[in-house]
Image (cartoon, rainbow, N blue to C red):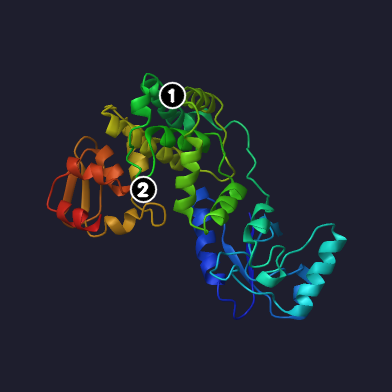
């Protein structure tokens, strides 16, 4: 996938847009490099129908229409039009294409400053990542097995348990299950994430929390059946790595099972690749910074990482600690645990 960030010199928000766009690419595990495109001439603005700065293109087309020029701002807009001539040109081309083209300045937007929700509701999401068909069964077996195991262990929960807190601060057990199942079904494509973040101040965590709470209103029995179906008909997004999906299922599975007191004997073949993946994470969990200068050693399998004061414990607890789950600290010991407590 080709990802372009279009901006003009002096735009106050293009660096923020680049940072948050990179977060989306990291979350989706898309190995794309953001191509910065400085629009510095009238001719270039006319040629590409430059709507406003910053704009984002996916494979040469709008990722979200309009092209994300509306980063939230106290005054109602995140940038400004390239110039009046470019604005007129964009509007004229928009009329020829049969749609109303928007610019970055609030006084030119459909609702003006007083009606920001009018144009936000009009956003059209594009470019969800298409499914690529059944994936290799042997490679994806661990994720499938984890999903089926979770569905079996959670099947007999009562209403009180479904509504009890998980290890995810803003989610109940049912919210985590709904989020996990939606991810397994491929619900979080580029368009969904861009649109969700745009509706929540371009804050990924805020959007994910709200989305999980909405999905969690479903009947858990229905969600469990959807999880079983997703496991049986696993599909992958382009460029997706099996270990990343396994990590998502394993960590969120423990987010539910730990507070419920459900003990799971997680296989070494599942935990070791997830531990190797999470230890290098920078953006999602911040694990790399959390464990810097420490040596982690699993006591129940052959896995270790780093150098410095030692932290020992079960591999599952080490993975959950690296993923930022404070509850896992109780299962760890060693000279380095004091540093982990201070960094939480």
Q: Is residue 222 above or below residue 27?
A: above
For label 1, the crowd category at 10 Å Cα-Cα, with few meaning under 14, some 14 to 19 and many 20 or more, is some
Name, please, the residue furthest toward the right: 96
Quadrant for residue 263, please give it: top left
Name, please, the residue furthest toward the front: 114
For label 2, the crowd category at 10 Å Cα-Cα, with few meaning under 14, some 14 to 19 and many 20 or more, is many
Left or right? Give the position of 88 relative to 144. right
**Residue 124 seen anywhere in this rendered image of the structure:** yes
Residue at image point 40% right, 40% down = 247
* x and y, in percent, of residue 335 in the image: 12, 52
Q: Quadrant of the C terminus?
A: bottom left
**Viewer-side label of 1, 2:** 1
Measured in 3D between alpha carbons, the distance from the residue under mark 1 to the one under mark 2, in whole angstroms, is 23 Å
* x and y, in percent, of residue 196 in the image: 56, 50
Assign a secondary structure to mark 2. Answer: helix
Name, please, the residue furthest toward the top: 156
Would you name the residue on which mark 1 appears? 148
Assign a secondary structure to mark 1. Answer: helix
Q: Is residue 65 above or below residue 224?
A: below
In-front residue for pair 199/194: 199
Left or right? Give the position of 39 relative to 203. right
**Residue 58 seen anywhere in this rendered image of the structure:** no
Residue at image point 42% right, 40% down = 248
Residue at image point 42% right, 30% down = 142
Q: Residue 278 carries which label?
A: 2
Q: In which quarter of the image is the N terminus?
A: bottom right
Q: Which mark is residue 30?
A: none
Left or right? Give the position of 125 relative to 219. right
Q: In this view, does 311 lie above or below 181?
A: below
* x and y, in percent, of residue 112 in the image: 68, 67
């Amino acid at each position: 996938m080709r990802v372009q960030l279009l901006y003009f010199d002096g735009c106050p928000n293009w660096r923020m847009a680049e940072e948050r766009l990179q977060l989306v690419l990291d979350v989706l595990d898309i190995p794309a490099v953001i191509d910065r495109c400085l629009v510095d001439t009238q001719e270039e603005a006319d040629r590409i129908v430059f709507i406003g700065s910053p704009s984002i293109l996916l494979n040469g087309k709008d990722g979200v229409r309009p092209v994300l020029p509306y980063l939230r701002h106290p005054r109602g807009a995140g940038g400004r039009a390239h110039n009046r001539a470019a604005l007129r040109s964009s509007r004229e081309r928009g009329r020829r294409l049969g749609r109303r083209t928007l610019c970055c300045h609030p006084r030119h937007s459909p609702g003006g400053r007083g009606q920001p929700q009018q144009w936000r509701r009009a956003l059209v999401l594009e470019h969800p990542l298409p499914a690529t068909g059944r994936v290799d069964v042997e490679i994806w077996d661990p994720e499938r097995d984890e999903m089926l195991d979770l569905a079996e262990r959670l099947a007999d929960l009562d209403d009180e348990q479904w509504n009890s807190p998980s290890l995810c601060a803003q989610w109940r057990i049912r919210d985590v299950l709904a989020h996990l199942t939606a991810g397994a079904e491929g619900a979080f494509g580029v368009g969904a994430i861009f649109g969700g973040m745009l509706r929540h101040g371009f804050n990924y965590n805020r959007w994910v929390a709200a989305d999980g709470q909405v999905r969690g209103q479903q009947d858990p029995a229905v969600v469990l059946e959807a999880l079983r179906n997703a496991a049986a008909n696993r599909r992958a997004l382009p460029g997706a790595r099996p270990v990343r999906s396994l990590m998502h299922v394993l960590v969120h599975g423990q987010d539910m099972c730990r507070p419920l007191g459900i003990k799971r004997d997680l296989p070494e073949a599942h935990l070791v690749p997830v531990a190797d993946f999470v230890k290098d994470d920078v953006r999602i969990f911040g694990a790399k910074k959390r464990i810097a200068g420490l040596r982690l050693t699993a006591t129940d399998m052959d896995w270790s990482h780093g150098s410095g004061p030692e932290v020992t414990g079960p591999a599952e607890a080490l993975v959950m600690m690296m993923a930022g789950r404070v509850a896992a600290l109780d299962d760890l010991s060693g000279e380095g645990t004091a540093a982990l407590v201070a960094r939480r």
